[in-house]
Image: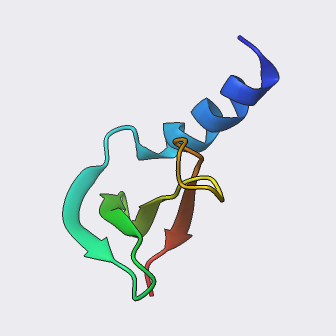
Amino acid sequence: MDSHAKFYIDKLLQFVDGKIVGVVNSPDGFFGLTIKVKNDTKVLWFLSDDEGNNPGSFDIQSEK
């Protein structure tokens, strides 16, 4: 596995055994999933590249 793939897999592993509890959208048009894992709730945001023509990346934030 290359280091780029490992980076993303390591980030996503925190959601194993989590439960999707909601769907959110931001004022600037991004969408995400609210995921509860143990005693923490995070938002997994789906992003795109700057041109909007490739999958891009994702961002994870603790829910406030």
**Foreground residue among 28 and 16:** 28
Q: Give the residue displayed 20% in from the left and 68% down from the top.
A: 22
Where residue 40 sits, quadrant-wise, is bottom left
Where residue 34 sits, quadrant-wise, is bottom left
Q: Give the residue displayed 45% in from the left and 88% down from the top.
A: 64
Task: List the single residue furthest toward the right.
Answer: 3
Above/below status of 54 relative to 50:
above
**Foreground residue among 51 and 5:** 51
Above/below status of 48 relative to 27:
above
27 horizontally vs 23: left or right? right
- What percent of the width, then of the height, locates residue 31? 35, 67
Q: Quadrant of the N terminus?
A: top right
Q: How many marks?
A: 0
- What percent of the width, then of the height, locates residue 4? 75, 28
Q: Give the residue displayed 43% in from the left and 79% down from the top.
A: 63
Where residue 48 sits, quadrant-wise, is bottom right
Above/below status of 41 relative to 56:
below
Q: Give the residue displayed 42% in from the left and 67% down from the top.
A: 43
38 horizontally vs 2: left or right? left
